[in-house]
Each structure stands twice: as structure tokens, then as C-alpha cells.
Image (spheres, grey):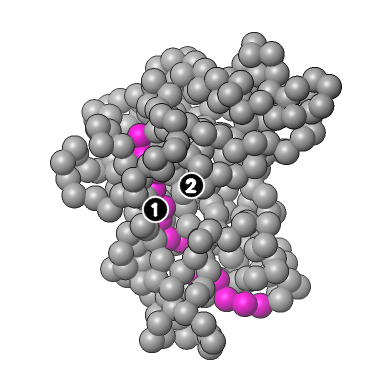
Amino acid sequence: MRVPLILLPLLLAACVSHPATPAAPEAPDNFRAEDFQPPATGARITLLPMQETQYDMLRTGAEMLESQLKRQLTVQGYQVTLVKRDDYLKHWQEEAKSVGGVYVEDSGEFKPREYTQALESLMRKTCAATSCALLINHRLLLRPAHIDKGKIAWDGVSQPFLLPSETEQGYAISVELTAVTPAGELGFRRYGAVTALSSLGLAEIRQQVEQKKLFVDAEVAQGVRIALQSLRERQGTPAATAPMPADTPAAVTPAPPAAGPEQPLPPAVPEPKASVTPAPR
């Protein structure tokens, strides 16, 4: 079960840095559409602006993540375009207004159908404007991990974990990549292990953040490499993927945003019900 990111300061802290071996099973909730095919070499992939994470601790890795993603996509032979956040949010406001808003004016009730329509339109238009073959949203998030016999395993990696633990349930940080096709459909969602976490107090966590010790470039690179596996697999290649929930229409059911501004800011991509998160603020 995914732990809400907002609980991070209550549960976790600093990274435990050990050489990692990508030997653990892939994430069970990886998803890849049956008909998804990676874009051809030389095609353009557009990176959506990284959401403001729900917890400041993860922002320290944002630049590393974007840099690694751009670098590895370029090495794979793709052209890479980054969408400016201000432009993206401006276009979101326009799309939300075009469907009559995503809140009922009097009651403030969220309108999921209109929200989905606006978001799908935004995805299609963003891809068209950048002539992309694929849109990718990227973020860092908290993930469950399994601790056993001095090792911690999660999202494609198993590594030594020498801290004492009274439970087999641990936590870690991973890269999440979500790819959307030019038609606005979900191509894949995949996770890659970055950093294992221990159980220090909040003060120690803040100290790690201030000293910028939480994220290591090599670990972020590893997470990106694992999460990009779907771009190295052709149709028919065996891959560990979770089926899309049966009650999810198409591939798109965004999470309701928290009430607030006149038109809520969008999540960077449509979210399947299995891993919804509030819209960034």
C-alpha cells in the first residue's frame, strides 16, 4: 500500500547510501499499455514541468532528476523538449475555463468529468505544440520497501540495509515516470529505485536536507535508468506490468484537486485511480 507523501516527515529520514544491485523484482504496479510502442530513434519526447512536490524534502532532487532524464533520453537517441511551467499553467487555466470550470460555482463541488476533459485536451495540445511523440511526467515519491536478512528491496533494486529494523516493512524514494501518447492515452507508468530511508527524527531529516545529503546523483541516475526500461522494450517483450484497474475509463481518472484557486492547478498527467495524488498548489 502506498503511504501518503504527507506522512514522510513522521515516518522517515535520511538516506542510507550503499552500492545497489538492480536484482530485486520490478515494481508490481508498473503499467504498460498492451499496444504501447517506444517512439523511433530521433523522435521528440516532451518533459512536462515537474510538479511542486507535496513535501519540501523531495524538491532537492528535482534538478538532478530532470538533468538525468534529459541526459539518458538524449543518449537513447531522442530529442528532448522541456515545457516551461508558467506556460503550462497558463494553458491549463484556459482549458479549465473552456469546460466551464472544474468546480460548481455555488457549492465548490469538484467536477471530475470536466476536469478530465480539460486535462486530456491540455495533454493533446501540449504534445501537438511541441511536435512530440511522447509526453513524460517525472517526479520523486515515497514508496514501500521490503526489509529481510540485512537487505532492503524495492522497485528493481536490492541493496544492503544495515540499520536495525523490527519490521519487514520499510520505505524508500523512487522515480516515477508516466508517459502519455499524443492521443492523450497512458503509455506506461514505471518506477525506479533511488534512495532507501531510515527512521531518524524530523530534525535530522531537515539537517540532511539542508546539507543536501538526501539525493546522490548516481542513485537518481539509477532510478531513471530503471524507470525508462519501457522505452527500451518493444511490443511483445516480457515486462512486469500491473493491469489497469477495470473501473478506470480509458487511462485517465485524475485526482480531485484541493479547493483553492479559481481554477485548480493540474497534476502533470492524468492519474489512474490506483495512484492518485492531489493537484499541485
Which element type, helix, strand or loop, lies under badge 1? loop
Measure how far apart labels 2 and 1 are at the Cα level: 9 Å
Q: Nearer the viewer, residue 247 or 108?
A: 247
Task: Answer above or below: position of 173 versus 255.
Answer: below
Range of residues picked out in magenta: 187-200
Image location of residue 227, percent across then percent down: 37, 50
Residue 274: which disc? Answer: 2
Residue 40 locus on image (x, y percent): 24, 28
Which residue matches tag 1?
A: 29
Which is the main secondary structure of the residues drawn in magenta?
strand
Q: Residue at x 58, y 61 (%)?
A: 3
Horizontal relation, residue 226 to residue 117: left or right: left
Q: Residue at 63% of width from left, 51% of height from top?
A: 59
Which numbered disc, 2 or 1, marks the residue that appears first in the sequence?
A: 1
* Label 2 crowd (10 A; few <14 / some 14-19 / many >=20): few
In the image, residue 275 lies in the stretch drawn in magenta: no
Give percent across and percent down for residue 178.
44, 40
Verify CB contact (< 8 Å) between mark 2 and mark 1: yes
Which amino acid is tagged 2? Ala
Looking at the picture, tell me which residue is in the foreground, 61 or 201: 201
Q: Quadrant of residue 215?
A: bottom right
Question: Quick check: 72 above or below 39?
Answer: below
Is 197 magenta? The answer is yes
The number of numbered discs placed on residues in the rendered structure image is: 2
